[in-house]
Image (cartoon, grey):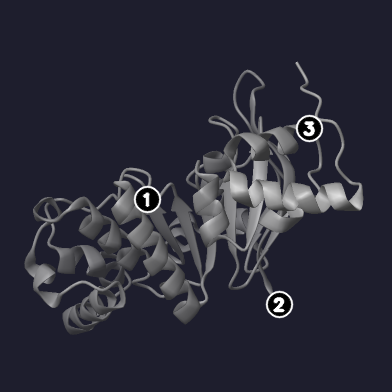
Amino acid sequence: MATVLRFEKASKIYDGGRAAVAEVSLEVQAGETLALIGPSGCGKTTLLKMVNRLVEKTGGRILVEGREVAQWDPIQLRRSIGYVIQQIGLLPHLTVEKNLGYVLKIMGRSPSQCRQRAEELLELVGLPLELLKRYPGELSGGQQQRIGVARALAADPRMILMDEPFGAIDQITRNQLQDELLKLQARLSKTIILVTHDIQEAIKLADRIAIMREGRLEQVGTFKELTASPANDFVELFLQANCPYDSRSRHRQKRAASGKVQPVRIVK
């Protein structure tokens, strides 16, 4: 399986010496969904934005498709990567059709090509074509977020960055959108890096979960691997505090049976 994204001791140090991201090394494979999770301020969104150079790294290397991001033209890099955010970011003065075709128009596609692609994208995310002529303000929150996902897919990028994409939506709609994303991923096999504060969402959507703290990567692995063999006390306590009880207890029972459970020590 090809590596689409690689971090090699990637860092972001702000003026004054504060490290938002500290020497993170990580690989993301083609077609994989990786979730970044951790306490507020742990650096997960900063790390995500370093991929498309919305935040410039100050150390280490980040390679997209084997090419260092510093060697990419920033605009070209961003057009090659889908990007979905919690605030959705649709242009309010443009119709749904023009929002979906915005990047394609910049890339030189004809109006008919933009229109055709917009229709394909609406069908892909399960929305009626009649929405093409509406404006974002005329849509529900769930519809707007579906359009946001569709827009990220417009140029058929190999990789999509998602920053708390469903965080501002009610739980029922959130669950529906998560299910739809799983169906889309099964069809399209995109490489997805997802920032979330909700570990249940990470468990549901991601192949692997990367747990961060204070800018550092504490551990990365499948949910089963994390719960069976947490790397340190922080990971253990984070999972205990945030994981669904039934899922966590099943894995702790397995660890207890194997003699791998260690006393939990809270580091102050």
Percent of width and height locating residue 242: 58, 38
Which tag, 2 or 1, sits closer to the chain's start?
2
Quarter that holds the N terminus: bottom right
Direction from residue 230 to residue 194 in the image, left or right: left
Q: Mark 3 points at which residue?
A: 233
Percent of width and height locating residue 131: 12, 68
Quarter that holds the C terminus: top right
The residue under label 2 is which amino acid type?
Answer: Met
Near-viewer residue (255 or 108)? 255
Look at the numbered disc 1 and give the secondary structure of its residue: loop
Q: Seen from this angle, which residue lies furthest right?
A: 259
Percent of width and height locating residue 98: 17, 66
> Looking at the rendering, which quadrant does residue 123 occupy?
bottom left
Q: Mark 1 points at which residue?
A: 166
The residue under label 1 is which amino acid type?
Answer: Phe
Q: Mark 2 points at which residue?
A: 1
Q: Label 3 neighbourhood size at 10 Å, few (<14), some (14-19), many (20+)?
A: some
